[in-house]
Amino acid sequence: MWLTRAISNKSKINNSKMLVIDERSLTTCFCRKTKRKEKEGADSSASADSKLYLEATVLERKLPEMDIKLLVDLPAGLDYNEWLASHTMSLFDHVNLVYGTISEFCTATTCPDMTGPGQRTYLWFDEKGKKTKVAAPQYIDYVMTFIQKTITDETIFPTKYANEFPVSFESIIRKIVRLLYHVVAHLYAAHFKEVVPLGLHSHLNQTFAHLMALHHRFSLIDSKETDILEDLEVALGLAQNSLEVGNNNEKKDEQDGAEEGSIHSTDDTCGDNKS
Ligand SMILES: [Zn+2]
């Protein structure tokens, strides 16, 4: 189970006192949290525009480009939905691990809005389909709770032999991947300054690379969502140039048809994902 892995990985990280996190705090990280008073009030808006994550010294990641492309390539004979399910669950684990590590710095005070780079703000759709402005930790709690609930739902992510994936499976995967992208975007925009001292930036970059490789291979996220981190994709060498990013997105736009104009919110109707 992912929590076990999160704990064992965490124990290897350096001796910073913020990492003295017991199992209870991890298992409650969806509805946390223990906060450090001295960090509340820290200015997160300044880092949103400085783009520390584009600096050459923090662009390392763990696997070279070709290995990432091979990682997401569907092996012959393997079921497409199984493949998507496997990668999505893995991405959820890793995003949750990184966010869980810095979550004490993500509070209603430091992050009153769910932001991404470039002043992007995400709004949550409540159970009545109404857009709601929520603080980042609340938004991410909704996201993680929704995904956890979804991937453990036997009718959506079947594990028993006789059960099959629902016809809506791919659209559910798209939604999960998009919501994970929002969390990653927030980590880069608001918490990279906390990620780097922990030495987790290469892991975050790797997770982002995995997410984008999966997206580029199967066209999972709308270009109006992914434009905010295109510069990071280029900096990390995930796209040969901006043209590749653009081409992929154009293809996706054709498939999706018209969507909302300028997306400054999720286009989700997450009626069942509030805890
Ligand atoms: Zn935050």
Image (cartoon, grey):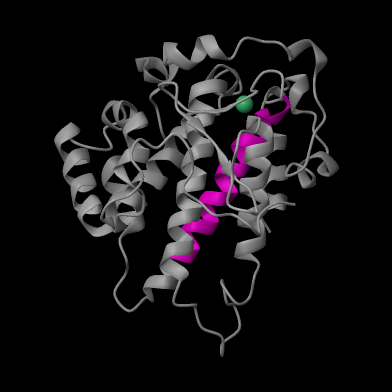
Q: Position of residue 133 (x, y in %)?
A: 61, 33
Residue lying at 34% horizontally and 27% vertically, measured from the top left? 232
As displayed, is residue 165 above or below residue 102?
below
Q: Is residue 262 visible?
A: yes
User: Total marks drawn?
Assistant: 0
Res. 6 image quadrant? top right
Residue lying at 56% horizontally and 45% vertically, measured from the top left? 94
Which portion, as a residue range, is magenta? 84-104
Q: Position of residue 35 (x, y in %)?
A: 80, 24
Q: Quarter holding the N terminus?
A: bottom right
Residue lying at 69% horizontally and 22% vertically, measured from the top left? 105
Query: Which of 139 and 74 lies nearest the eye of the viewer?
Result: 139
As displayed, is residue 195 above or below residue 204?
above
Q: Is residue 241 visible?
A: no
Does residue 269 appear left or right of residue 84 in this picture?
A: right
- Which of the four quarters of the rendered structure image does ligand 1 lie in? top right
Res. 153 image quadrant? bottom right
**Magenta span main SS:** helix
Does residue 213 appear left or right of residue 192 in this picture?
A: left
As displayed, is residue 43 above or below residue 178?
above
Residue lying at 72% horizontally and 36% vertically, measured from the top left? 11
Query: Which of 260 and 72 lies nearest the eye of the viewer?
Result: 260
Q: Position of residue 202 (x, y in %)?
A: 47, 30
Q: Position of residue 34 (x, y in %)?
A: 82, 29
Residue 49 magenta-drawn? no
Residue 93 magenta-drawn? yes
